[in-house]
Image (tube, rainbow, N blue to C red):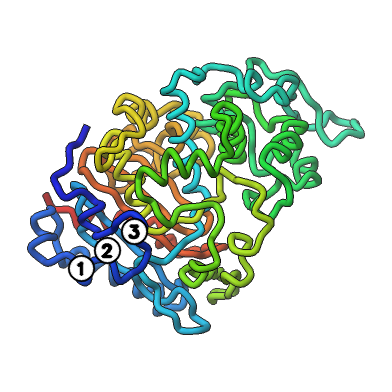
Amino acid sequence: MIMLPTPTLLLALCLCVGSASAAELPPAAPSRDDILQAGFAPERLQRLDAAIEAEIGRQQLAGAVVLIARDGRPVHFKAYGLADRENARPMQRDAIFRIASMSKAITSVAAMMLYEQGLFLLKDPVAKYLPEFAKVQVALPAQAGSALPFATEKPRRPLLIRDLLRHTAGMTYGAGPAAAAYQQGGFSDWYILGNKETLAQWVQRFAALPLQGQPGEVWQYGYATDVLGRLIEVVSGQPLDRFIAERITGPLAMVDTSFWLPPQKAHRLANVYGIEGGRLVLKETAASSDFVHGPRQLLSGGAGLLSTTTDYARFLQMLLNGGELDGRRLLSPKTVELMRADHVGALYRSSGATDADGFGLGFWVTSRLGGAAGELGSEGAYGWGSAYFPQYAVDPKERMIIVFMAQHRPAGGSNLHLRVKALAYQALIK
């Protein structure tokens, strides 16, 4: 477990429970001496600034926020560009972002908290808690001459809870032999926030479809964490949003992390832009967002949360600390160790993933430096990203977290969100 010096990230960022305005953030960036003492070269951090500002200048990025922290103290915390280009509204460090698949880490931690209570084992069948999966089938390509769009076979082993956490459950976002059936049922996109149904109703419908791969035999990214969210509800006896609020975001003082955005915070929600024809195009504002005006029924543990850079940094710092922050322990160090171990090995690499060489319980993990990713990093680092462009990384060896927040869908081809990690590491000199 890494013990952080006082003050912790909460004090270092001047964030108090209930605070939510940029005025309460540090009035100035860390000094040159602070940066050098943290082991970074200020001149090299300017390369990160230059890369982001170049994308903004080329109109390939509207705005972003980056936070790099080491030993619980911010080394680099800066907002760039605009949150709203149409109204020339600058990006602020307290901007609220749709974090999509970065929700998965939070939902995975929620599940592991229940696991620590002894309420289930990771090798337990999912059907023990969600009986709608008791008779699930596995889709196969249609046989020649068959009038059916796909064939099915029985699972070769039960679908397990660990399959939900490590994405070996055969639950895709539509890809696979049963793609047409997924499309017809409305299961062909990660975005399910606008559905007018509860998570229980959604899972009941989803369980009627076949899996797209045999449990445990293939790594397939998709709805597994949404199903995990429903399992959390059943085991805990609480709605997913209440469990996360009471057990995670409340204790960690993540004051701006939630499934729905209160109207009084709508002005802080960054616009979503996409790249079309090589140019930025407005996709969504607070006025048109389901996070503000939607049905507010379906709690998507896989892609449904909002957060800020500092909120998410606090969550990551808790993991980096071995499950504890500011005296509030969510997980044991051994549980965090299990989560950041590689649980799938070659299955992840054979999926075509190139961000790391393995996958743990909720995020990619780097088992071997110079492995599948072949980029700057450390053995034991872990992280993930978002369909809206944000990325994060946690590096226990370097005692460092990296958070990049932006709002783009589709993201375009600049790979800036991936380059941010390399630009952070190249600035680390001791």
State the image coordinates of residue 123 (x, y, percent, origin top left).
Answer: 52, 17
Residue under pointer 2: 77
- Kindly report which numbered mark, 1 or 3, lies closer to the viewer in this rendering: 1
Identify the residue under disc 1. 29
Q: Residue at x 72, y 36 (%)?
A: 206
Query: Which of disc 2 and disc 3 is earlier in sequence?
Result: 2
Q: Is residue 140 above or below residue 354?
A: above
Tell me: residue 49, above or below residue 205: below
Report if residue 378 is visible in the image.
no
The answer to whether the residue labelled 1 contacts the one labelled 3, judged by CB atoms less than 8 Å apart, is no
Task: Name the kind of residue labelled 1 in the image.
Answer: Ala
Q: Of the residues shown, which amino acid type is indicated by label 3?
A: Val
Q: Kindly state the secondary structure of the residue where label 3 is placed.
A: helix
Q: Position of residue 154 (x, y in %)?
A: 73, 18
Marks 1,2: beta carbons within 8 A: yes
What secondary structure is found at the residue carrying circle 2?
strand
Spatial distance from mark 1 to mark 2, Cα to Cα? 7 Å
- First in sequence, mark 1 or 3: give its number: 1
